Amino acid sequence: MICKLCGNPNMDKPESHIVSKFFFDWLKRTSPTGFLREPQNSNKRLQDGLKLEFLCSNCEKVMGKWEKSFSEKIFKPLSNCNATFSFKCDDEYILKFGVSIVWRALEYNYGMNLISDMTEEELNDMQKALETWKDYLLDNSQGIGKNHVYIIPVKQFLDNGQPISIAYNRSVGIDFKVFDDQYWGFVFVKVPNMIIIGDVIGDPDSNMKKYQIYKQNTIKDEVLPIIPEVVVRVINNSIAHFEKGAENISQHQIEKIRYTYNKTSNK
Ligand SMILES: [Zn+2]
């Protein structure tokens, strides 16, 4: 296998997490039983997140540094805070971490052939986004151009006046959506207490600016955040899936995904 990031043909580490491991570690630590449980089948225990042959050990190490900083300086304080939490985006590890998350999620969707019904132009935009993020992660470029990355804290988020369910807040999921009515396509990563989004196609809603990772910005966890309507649609859609249990992957499904991924992504 070839490392998806640096192209190293000698992968010495066969498996890496598609969504950072520290999120799953936190879920395990804060779960009353110490395991991740599937609501539909509480006998099954899902110890870990989805792992695939993805990165070489060197790339894992580089990403691990950004993950550690993000986990300690932002994720844990946000998760442990009982009041409103906010953070400044003035340190580079925040953008590096955010890009590493959306790049892995889009690369996974693409590698699994999960993206269909796209025009040639949209496919081009998607490949461009993957290249732009990759170049930034590899320090081949200084920025990410128009493929912005956002973090929306949703710990306090109220949906129709009701607090978002604790179970959903603790869920993990990834998605890719294109909205024709707004000509905006993005990759969506739900992790505990936050949503991470990366622009892939078209133009983002102007309300996204306050969640964008850029040096001068301070991102706040608000009770009534102004989230664009299409993003709320994706959230509601993923809540509906989550409640049906569709987002809770079993070990058997993980094996199937791994098999399909390895078969389709060797290009
Ligand atoms: Zn590598």
Image: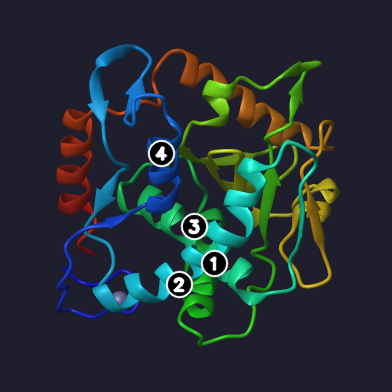
54 sits left or right of 181 in the view: left
Q: Residue at x 56, y 70 (%)?
A: 96
- Circles 2 and 1, Cβ within 8 Å, touching? The answer is yes
From the Cβ of disc 3, is ligand 1 less than 8 Å away? no
Q: Amino acid at mark 3?
A: Ile
- The disc label shown at residue 29, or none: 4
Of the two numbered discs 1 and 4 in the rendering, the one whose residue sits closer to the viewer: 4
Q: Secondary structure at mark 3?
A: helix
Q: Nearer the viewer, residue 95 or 169?
A: 169
Q: Earlier in the sequence, mark 2 or mark 3?
A: 2
The residue identified by callout 1 is 69
The residue identified by callout 3 is 101
- Regarding residue 184, the answer to whether it shows in the image is no
- Circles 2 and 3, Cβ within 8 Å, touching? The answer is no
Above or below, 118 relative to 215: above
Q: Residue at x 27, y 62 (%)?
A: 54
Q: Amino acid at mark 4?
A: Arg
**Quadrant location of ligand 1?**
bottom left
237 sits left or right of 130 in the view: right
Of the two numbered discs 2 and 4 in the rendering, the one whose residue sits closer to the viewer: 4
How far is the residue under mark 1 from the one under mark 4? 19 Å
165 sits left or right of 259 in the view: right
Q: Earlier in the sequence, mark 1 or mark 3?
A: 1
